[in-house]
Image: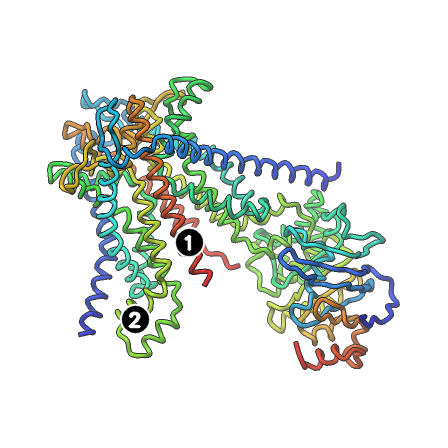
Amino acid sequence: MTHTQKRIIVNNIVMMLSTLSAIIGIGFLFWILGVLILNGVDALSWNIFSQEGAPPGYEESGLKHALIGQLMIVGVATFFGVPLGILAGTYLSEYGQQSKLAETIRDISDIMMSAPSIVIGAFVYAVVVAPMGHFSGWAGSIALTIIMLPIILRTTDDMLQLVPSTLREAAFALGAPKYKVIMQVVYRGAKAGILTGILLGVARVAGETAPLLFTSFNDNFLNTNMNEPMASLTVTMFNYATSPYEDWQKLGWAAAFILSMFILGLNILGRLFLLKKRGK
Amino acid sequence: MSIFIDKLFRYASRFVAMSILLLVAWIFTVLLQNSMESITALGFDFVTETKWAPNLEKFGALPAIYGSVLSTFIAMVLAVPLAIGVAIFLSELAPAKLKSPVGVSIELLAAIPSVIYGMWGLFYFVPIIRDHVGGIGISMLTAGIVLSIMILPFMAAVTRDAMNTTPDILKESAYALGGTKWDVIKDIIIPYAKAGIIGSFILALGRAIGETMAVTFVMGNVHNISLDITAPATSIPVTLANEFNEADSGLYYSSLFELSLLLLIISFTIISIAKFYFLRRKRIA
Amino acid sequence: MATIAEILEEKTLEVKDFEFTYASAEQASIKKLTMPIAKHSITALIGPSGCGKTTLLRSFNRMHDLYPGNKYDGEILFKGRNILQEKEDLINLRIQIGMIFQKPTAFPMSIFDNVAYGMRLQGMKNKSELSDRVEKALKDAAIWKEVKDRLKHDANGLSGGQQQRLCIARAIAVEPEVLLFDEPTSALDPISTSGIEELIVELKERVSIIIVTHNMQQAARVSDYTGFMYLGELIELGKTEDMFVTPREKLTEEYITGKFG
């Protein structure tokens, strides 16, 4: 056998292995997706949206409490996290630029994005839950805000930097003050990108479970008082799925399905915004 | 007036940006303060002691550290070759019609929250391990496998992106000398994208070691150092998730905070290595 | 029909009724092109951008096969066989027909390993034989003196002109019969350019050369034959000195006098 023939055989083997690993990898992932859809659709019913939690065995049980709790916790986190993140990102791109301070903030934010979220939960427990003496929806929102902040900050920073500097210069040349240039020219130019960043940031924190375990904790019933423990889809899913009761497990799958579809939806929407922008 | 707003905007944005640094410093300080009781009481024994028995006021973190390291190791051993295979497939092998849909679905799967992976692992993977490998199914091995599947999409997507940075003209040059696809991949693409690939693997490692929900479902939270990977075990995040709400004494709490601090330091270190050592260097194309 | 001057030398390649269509295109980028390539001489392909000269060049070593869906028609004869056939051994073909690209393409490895790469692919393991041939190739590419003390260094540390000569050394180390140059000096400064041009002229002793260039002075300086292409067709092929002085086609004259392009 010549060396070249050997090389061709090795090449074919490696290509087969690579295709095989792609099939295995993708197979696993579609297995998870399939399980999620089958169990989720099976568990869906009107009760899911209209009923609160109930002891195991109750017909009339649903996830209304968790859905509303989830929306409130994530909503409040978004309310604080998005403007703060955009403001901080604006500083990096428009004022700090390549300064040492700005670069340090970028680096630390990048690290924070991959840092373990359960540690953020422990931190918020120490500074919010322990002094207040009880778990609360606020504490959960604060934990999620901390997780969201670096994501929004970095995407805003990146997206603003993509706006061509000639655009800024043109606005300055007309005598506009910097804040007006930023608000009216730079933000407008980066709108789609910032929006995508927000959607991805919300999607990311919406799936967080660990930092809520000991901040917002859980509640099996509907509660809209942010000052008290509050149910979330993720923690409810965790509690129900690890319970021995079949009807609770089923509710857990429904929660998993709704949450995943919400998060996938946000991700797809975010991509579409970017695609649309690129298409222009 | 507009000068005032201009100044206000500048200082407000600067304040918020700087508060990120303060926040991180605050997190470290708070965790350290809350760990002080355990640090003074247990000292260095905390990380060498193998016994964790809250009812006896015994807090040894070694089983959790061991579990974190071993489960992450299993996950990496399984995920790295698969991720490379998927990345090769996506960047060099897949027909144009498959490239984009498969690539996008991998990226979307990276966005699925880890709690879903954990739940899937509990209901579908635990029985398989129990019936075909042994033990009760809740184990170090199961945790490692679920973790590997969870980090696979991220690793594959980033590895593919790194491989795609290789200029076409460089690949063509190697083909023009009579190289096969595999020759070009191993001699040109992988060396060219090496820093990016290793960096993304280390980043995935940093994420995996701090991952909580994917493993909490399937690990069992048993503080035991065993070479038998089919036995239940624990890791730092699993211990935190299971015990934080149960802690009833000052020392118990404090040792959980010390675990958090330990985890944060480990992840920060790993992620920093990935970022500063591998992902920073820019190549001149 | 194209005006094709008589070629007295032996031919290394013969293009016959060749057509090429890109996967993304509906129309052929090269239409019914017939063209002989003389052995041990330099043939330059000129023409405005989009005329198909690079597309033609990349057909000689079947580079287009790297991207799916591209279609060849007609014949390119090399050593008596049509290299466009399905069953053509592309690895072997590319060893015999080497290529130099628009930009230097030093591989991410040492200078020595760059030059040895093609030989190693063919299975050459003998160290002393390898280093003899690397040295010879580097000498032939007129870069030996500059790199002999740093053969183990990363090739990306060389200057652009040095890298391009390194790529030429890498290509000639496997002793090809034909070398394809795709605008080899477009990324280089004037001094490096003239160095590469001298080198190309010297190389024709051993290999047949086809060079695509957008620089008409370069074609005039280095080539023996020049082919002028326009809109996927060969308009005129002739001895370089004749063609630049007395072009036979009106289009050729307009192009070389700068009326378009």
Seen from the viewer's position, the closer of residues B282 and B245 is B245
Residue A268 in the image, given as x and y percentages of width and height: 40, 48
Q: Residue at x 74, y 57 (%)?
A: C60
Please tell me how crowded label 2 is: few (under 14), some (14-19), or many (20+) other residues with Cα within 10 Å. many
Q: Amino acid at mark 2?
A: Val
Q: Chain of mark 1?
A: A
Is residue C144 positioned above or below B152 on the image? below
Q: Amino acid at mark 1?
A: Leu
Q: Quadrant of residue C2?
A: bottom right
Residue C245: x and y, percent? Answer: 78, 81
Residue that carries the numbered disc 1 in the rendered image: A272
Q: Is residue C141 visible?
A: no
Give residue C19's position: percent from left, percent from top: 74, 60
Distance of label 1 from label 2 (alpha carbons): 27 Å
Q: Nearer the viewer, residue A112 or A190?
A: A190
At a point 52% along the width and 43% down the height, the residue shown is B87
Q: Viewed as shown, does residue A47 lie left or right of A27?
A: left
